[in-house]
Image (spheres, coloured by chain):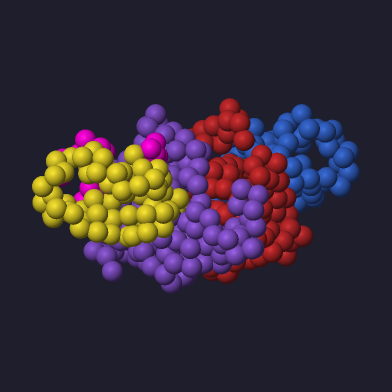
Chain colours: A red, B purple, C blue, D yellow
Amino acid sequence: MTDFPFIKVQTADFDLTTEVKALREGHKDIGAVVAFVGTVRDINEGEDICALELEHYPGMTEKALESIRLQAHQRWPLQSSLVIHRIGKMQPCDQIVLVAVASRHREAAFEAANFIMDYLKTNAPFWKKETLPDGAEKWVDARVSDKEAEAKWLSKTG
Amino acid sequence: MTDFPFIKVQTADFDLTTEVKALREGHKDIGAVVAFVGTVRDINEGEDICALELEHYPGMTEKALESIRLQAHQRWPLQSSLVIHRIGKMQPCDQIVLVAVASRHREAAFEAANFIMDYLKTNAPFWKKETLPDGAEKWVDARVSDKEAEAKWLSKTG
Amino acid sequence: MLDIFYFASFREALGQSQEQLPLASYKTVACLLDDLSKRGDAWQLALSANPNLQIAVNQTIADRSTRLNAGDEIAFFPPVTGG
Amino acid sequence: MLDIFYFASFREALGQSQEQLPLASYKTVACLLDDLSKRGDAWQLALSANPNLQIAVNQTIADRSTRLNAGDEIAFFPPVTGG
């Protein structure tokens, strides 16, 4: 599906233990792993959510995610990292995205995982459509706070 | 072993998927989970490590961890959090500690998990002893950078 | 030829996900957008009158001034909302 | 009585993990430390001459000025290194 072994865009769910094990495989001097899991909430901007559908731009998605991952590796001393993003139909409580980062020390791992998520939110071509209780469908609006979260990294030193 | 259901001090290993599932149980409006896993590195301060032994202060450990967890909940809007810390003998690559935090949005989850780890490092009564290749045992020295990491939260607003 | 893609709310509002157009008349993304906007209100709303329009050329973020070449893949979409 | 605990490198250097002492002579942690330090070099090194000495009374971080009461649990240990 992709040429990037540490990037997966898939309809299937993922297992945290399995993925973190794969992330750590072959690296003995890892001291810190930070894993972020984004999940479907049952309420968004005050409205009940019954289902969520994730559309993406095949090809560009993988390139964008790989570019974000490489920027993180240039900025922090990481042993490894991976990004999994699901597409298709999902229910409340489902896992949507996994960003996992391994490093010698915890600060780099926390910062890099946070950075990858902030950039993914504003640069990876995914779009969410919610289904409301009355059956109506609604494209999710981009959040201003996501742009602000991305911008904060410009003034930070890695 | 403890009166704090979200604090576990145990010799047994833990499974990430199982623990994150328990963390999320009963909370539907979680949008973000951040899990930190600390692992035994095979090298520390330039020396090869063959084994690690974790000693703790039973009773005070649980109180200290619960206090740190509550401070995080006062500071950020969290749905739930948990801390698992292993004690006893461990090998390189073994998991030592898990801090997992669930929140509506990712920023609180990242910050709270980072905060709990920084405070755990300097306030929870655990001590590490390393076994070197020649069989010598050596107590690990506290790191100045850990004190600095803790101090940074004093000037930050939650 | 140029391959044009529309995603998410654009795909729905414009009633199509992709099309091919001859390169000849479009030196830049702006030229292409001007022409597409003449197709009707939905097109103008999504493409010309939309301050949040996102543009990618060959799967890399681009803008109106980006020059086009034969075989280019151009995509138009709203701000992304994944994660 | 007071329950005294020693952890990690202190436990090893002092050759014991816990002991009981009568409260009577020790109004504060400082009094207790002064007395323990008279036991020899290892005690002085770990307890009196150690700028990094950590003290807990009843499982809460304390300092030399903390007052002691009957039944208190006092612990001495080096800086923590978990996580």
Quadrant (top left/top right/bottom left/bottom right) for the N terminus of chain A: bottom right
Q: Quadrant of residue A4?
A: bottom right
Outermost residue, bottom side: B12
User: Does residue A88 appear anywhere in the picture?
Assistant: no
Residue stretch rendered in magenta on the structure: D49-68
D67 magenta-colored: yes
Q: Position of residue B133 (x, y in %)?
A: 64, 63
Q: Quadrant of residue C70?
A: top right
User: Does residue A77 appear anywhere in the picture?
Assistant: yes
Front residue of this view, candidates A117 and A9: A117
Residue at screen point 13% across, 49% down: D23
Front residue of this view, candidates A118 and B92: B92
B98 magenta-colored: no
Q: Position of residue B45 (x, y in %)?
A: 61, 48
Q: Position of residue A70 (x, y in %)?
A: 70, 46
Q: Is residue A42 above or below residue B70?
A: below
- The dominant secondary structure in magenta is loop
Residue at screen point 60% across, 65% down: B135
